[in-house]
Image (cartoon, rainbow, N blue to C red):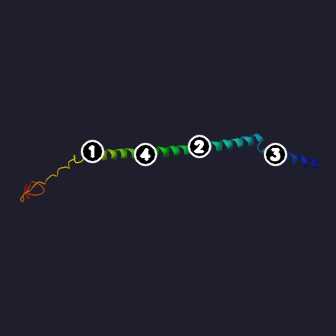
Amino acid sequence: MKKLFTYAAIAAFLSLAACGPSQAELDAEKKRKEDSARAADSIKAAEEAAKQKAYEDSVAAAAREQAIKDSLYKDSVEKASKKPGTTKPPKKKEPEKSTEGDPKVGKKKPGAK
């Protein structure tokens, strides 16, 4: 009976030891986790690089727009300073004189058909 109990204890111990992962499986899992972390880091770096490029592009676009505005302003100032007094103000139209008997809204008199 003692031998049977001993054999049963040894079998139970070996079956529990066999249930765990082998060293090769442990190494593969460790390698998989490292690869996953490396991939996540590279994705994060790529996203940050894309954000930085988008920021730089928007700054460059704003600088181009500002340069265009500055150029247009400079051109208009130069035109105004080169030819002073050459631009004539628009002529004012004189309102038409109406007689007292004529209606102000239309040509027909009130009540006329």
Of callouts 4 and 1, which one flags the residue occurring earlier in the amino acid sequence?
Answer: 4
Judging depth in this view, the residue of 53 and 44 nearest the camera is 53
The residue shown at (47%, 43%) is 57
Say whether marks 3 and 1 touch (CB < 8 Å). no
Q: How far, Cα to Cα, is label 3 from label 4?
A: 69 Å
Q: Regarding mark 2 in the picture, which secondary structure is present there?
A: helix
Closer to viewer: mark 3 or mark 4? 4
Of callouts 2 and 1, which one flags the residue occurring earlier in the amino acid sequence?
Answer: 2
Residue that carries the numbered disc 1 in the rendered image? 82
Q: Regarding mark 3 in the picture, which secondary structure is present there?
A: helix
Residue that carries the numbered disc 3 in the rendered image? 17
Q: Regarding mark 4 in the picture, which secondary structure is present there?
A: helix
Disc ID at residue 43: 2
Q: Is residue 1 visible?
A: no
Disc ID at residue 63: 4
Q: How far, Cα to Cα, is label 3 from label 1?
A: 97 Å
Residue type at numbered disc 2: Ile
- For the C terminus, give its image quadrant: bottom left
